Image: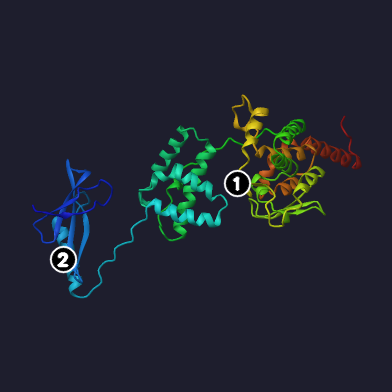
Amino acid sequence: MKVEGIMKSDTKKEVKHYRKRTKYQGVYERESDVKIFKGHPDLCFDIAYRTNGRLIWEKAGWLSEGYSAKLASDIRAGRIQNIRHGQELPRQKNKVPYFKDLAIKFLEWAKQNKRSWETDNFRYKKHLSCFDEKRLNEISSFDLERLKIELTKKGLSPASVKHVLILFRHMWNKAVTWKTHSGENPIKNIKLPTLQNQRERFLSYQEADELLNVLSKKDKQLHDIVLLSLHTGMRFGEIANLKRQNLDFENGLITIMDPKNNETRKSFMTNAVRQALSGYSNLSPWDYVFKKDGKKLEVVPYPYRTIANKLFNEGIEDPRQKITFHTLRHSFASWLALQNESLLTIGELLGHKTFQVTKRYAHLIPDHKKEATLNLEKVFNTKKQNNGMKVSA
């Protein structure tokens, strides 16, 4: 059979790059490099015809799918008949996009709409770019399960693995929203890692004082950042976003704009915080309070980790027991609970969106369950006495 031209394969390494004529006019066949059918390389049948003076190549189907040269010839005859009678040819379906194309579009969107877009960009390049050359309909639940296992073997924490999978889910859902793709999200059948990372460790007052003393001698700005988190429970991102106009020294208030839960809230300056922040009172209203090289801080200054590790983390393996920057916020909430503040107050000061998050501090509130039970007993006994009932000893 005569060799006809050169062509690109449908998928990577799927077929050899040539067609052979068959005995049917305009029908060609080509062998697969990888697909085997009944002990032989699978055959793909293509048809060729002209419309408006332009040569059209169209894939009919594979031998393993029930196609034959005769069936391909019949399909070609139907196309020619449509052309001759001015009927519209079947529209070629839009090809499903590659994952890399979705990633480009998603990251462009994230840069404009997500404060964490740089983290998304890092996770995509580091962990999800392995899907770049796959079309979305070629990514299966098995592929994601394998990725989950590989990331775990590399030493990523369950939380990190979960974040990567959630990013994939978000990207896919955006593709559906943008009508780029309509297939079911393959992550639907993947069980996300169960996290055991709820922090238990918080600083004692003495440890917090020790940390502040060390920082005051090494880095004034870092000292003020740590003090602010310890005394207000603010997240690092909230502190980094502070501008001079958010500080109300007259009323001792800090306005936290665009926090994690998107609900602006107020924090209150302690005397120590007011004194520390007064050093930034001469900034222009639109200046960021804390800066590095004249720009807003993007990450926790590196010296914090070094100092915290030296003071508190040597020999500690359990991440729940390590002191991180988030420990400062956790310490603020824990101190409030220990002084018997209500969970409602703690949740409002921390800017929690749900009570479920705040409830983790309930066990620190001194004897509140015992006191509630004893109070109930007192009321019960009083009622019995009033009704002339004998109270048991």
**Residue at 57% over, 52% down:** 115
Q: Answer left or right for 67 relative to 261.
A: left
Place of residue 296 in the rendered image (x, y in percent of width and height, measured from the top left) = 63, 49
Q: Answer left or right for 61 relative to 165.
A: left
Q: CA distance from mark 2 to mark 1?
A: 64 Å
Place of residue 289 in the rendered image (x, y in percent of width and height, measured from the top left) = 70, 50
Q: Is residue 13 above or below residue 77?
A: above
The three-letter code of the residue at mark 1 reads Glu
Q: Nearer the viewer, mark 2 or mark 1?
A: 1
Residue 276 found in image quarter: top right
Name the residue carrying label 1. 298
**Residue at 89% over, 40% down:** 382
Identify the mark nearer the N-term, 2 or 1: 2
**Residue at 58% over, 35% down:** 196
Asked if the residue at tag 1 contacts the one at tag 2, i.e. Cβ–Cβ closer than 8 Å, the answer is no
Q: Residue furthest bottom?
A: 86
The three-letter code of the residue at mark 2 reads Ala
Q: Is residue 191 above or below residue 185?
A: above
Name the residue carrying label 2. 77
